[in-house]
Image: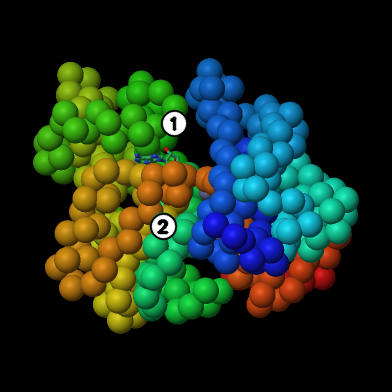
């Protein structure tokens, strides 16, 4: 398609263990999206090793960017800006992306746009379906974060609840590791749960008073205690029952958030949104509430740079470019950053 040059944004993502670059027009049309996963490098260690991640990003970043720009069919001068994740994430990994993006912004004389990784996840569904209506409740569930966000328009959002301890993905990864299912744990539990009984074991469903916050550390401990006391329990049943408890809690709070905010849709985001039980039951909940469910494709759930480019497009239009003094901010929170230097 003929791209409107000034609305095409190059996105760069290096916050964890995916090196990714993408070119997106108008925050909706993906011209190219390249994701190079380093997962094989981290599997032997049972989790992401920050130093290995940074070194791999250094090697992969420019080839991945080169491929994304080439596949987009655009020249660097046709890009309206270069968006890069500057937090939250692993500081060394973020620094590689931020430094690379600054170099490109200077070399190509294009605006630099710092993007919050969590905000980027919020835009992922819009790349699959630009006609999503507001107000919307987004359940953002990843390896590092679990939050319910009310979105009223692009760039207008409010956190309604979040985890007080482990993130949902972290709980999947820890339980999987304890059960000997390897890393990453989410897909392994998802897979094995198809062969188990979700009602075999009644694990606790934590409720944090009247709030829409979450807590998963008690559930994780309860799984560990159960397996220690019942060493012969079928791992399939443990996994399916654990997964059911996580999904129950996530969707109970999501339904409350929808009711409290009169939302017309539920949208899933983040790596755990790839979970098949969560996807299936989100459809049921949305149907029972009479609202839309938006389930991003699996490629848009996990970390990618198309969502960074989409977030960058909106940020550039609302706030203008970032300063070239942009730094990596590993603890960046959603909606809390001072936008521009
Ligand atoms: O969003 P993401 O790719 O990276 C972060 O920003 O954290 O999420 C990764 C997390 C991991 O904890 C992984 O175990 C989990 O998403 N995950 C899943 C599934 N696929 C990935 N969890 C449950 N079921 C899945 N199918
Ligand atoms: Zn992520």
Residue 297: x percent and y percent? 38, 49
Tell me if residue 107 can be seen: yes
Q: What's the residue at 30%, 81% (across, down)? A: 262
Which disc number belongs to residue 225? none
Q: Nearer the viewer, residue 180 or 150?
A: 150
**Which image quarter: residue 326?**
bottom right
Image quadrant in which the N terminus is located: bottom right
Q: Relative to 276, is 130 on the left or the right?
A: right
Q: Nearer the viewer, residue 315 or 183?
A: 315
Q: Nearer the viewer, residue 111 or 195?
A: 111
Q: Relative to 22, is 130 on the left or the right?
A: left
**What residue did someone put label 1 on?**
184
Mark 1 secondary-structure assignment: loop
Q: Relative to 300, is 222 on the left or the right?
A: left
Q: Which of the two labelled residues, at mark 2 and mark 1, occupies the earlier sequence position? A: 2
Tags 2 and 1 in contact by the CB under 8 Å rule? no
Mark 2 → mark 1, Cα distance in angstroms: 25 Å
Residue 87: x percent and y percent? 66, 54
For discs 2 and 1, the disc positioned in front in the rendered view? 2
Mark 1 vs ligand 1: CB below 8 Å: yes
Q: What's the residue at 44%, 27% (across, down)? A: 183
Residue 32: x percent and y percent? 57, 47
**Which image quarter: residue 199?**
top left
**Which image quarter: residue 181?**
top left
**What residue did someone put label 2 on?**
128
Query: Is 39 above or below relative to 208?
Result: above
Query: Is 152 above or below relative to 275?
Result: below
Query: Is 8 above or below relative to 181?
Result: below
Q: What's the residue at 45%, 79% (across, down)? A: 152
Mark 2 secondary-structure assignment: helix
Q: Residues within 10 Å of mark 2 (few under 14, many from 20)?
A: some
Q: Residues within 10 Å of mark 1 (few under 14, many from 20)?
A: many
């Amino acid at each position: 398609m003929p791209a409107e040059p000034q609305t095409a944004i190059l996105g760069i993502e290096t916050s964890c263990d995916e090196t990714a670059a993408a070119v997106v027009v108008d925050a909706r049309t993906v011209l190219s999206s390249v994701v190079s996963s380093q997962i094989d490098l981290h599997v032997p260690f049972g989790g992401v090793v920050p130093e290995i991640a940074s070194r791999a990003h250094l090697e992969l970043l420019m080839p991945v960017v080169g491929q994304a720009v080439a596949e987009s069919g655009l020249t660097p001068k046709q890009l309206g800006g270069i968006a890069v994740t500057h937090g939250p994430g692993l500081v060394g990994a973020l620094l590689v992306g931020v430094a690379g993006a600054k170099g490109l912004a200077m070399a190509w004389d294009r605006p630099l746009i710092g993007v919050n990784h969590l905000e980027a996840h919020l835009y992922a569904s819009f790349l699959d379906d630009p006609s999503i209506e507001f107000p919307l409740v987004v359940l953002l569930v990843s390896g590092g974060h679990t939050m319910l966000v009310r979105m009223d328009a692009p760039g207008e959002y409010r956190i309604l609840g979040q985890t007080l301890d482990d993130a949902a993905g972290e709980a999947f990864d820890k339980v999987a590791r304890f059960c000997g299912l390897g890393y990453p744990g989410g897909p392994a539990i998802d897979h094995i749960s198809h062969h188990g009984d979700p009602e075999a074991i009644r694990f606790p469903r934590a409720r944090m008073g009247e709030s829409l916050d979450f807590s998963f550390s008690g559930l994780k401990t309860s799984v560990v205690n159960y397996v220690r006391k019942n060493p012969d329990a079928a791992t399939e049943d443990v996994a399916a029952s654990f997964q059911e408890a996580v999904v129950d809690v996530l969707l109970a709070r999501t339904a409350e958030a929808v009711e409290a905010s009169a939302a017309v849709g539920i949208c899933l985001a983040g790596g755990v949104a790839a979970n098949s039980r969560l996807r299936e039951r989100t459809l049921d909940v949305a149907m029972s509430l009479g609202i839309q469910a938006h389930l991003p494709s699996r490629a848009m759930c996990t970390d990618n740079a198309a969502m960074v480019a989409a977030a960058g497009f909106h940020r550039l239009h609302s706030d203008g470019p970032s300063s070239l003094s942009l730094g990596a901010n590993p603890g960046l929170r959603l909606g809390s950053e001072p936008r521009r230097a």
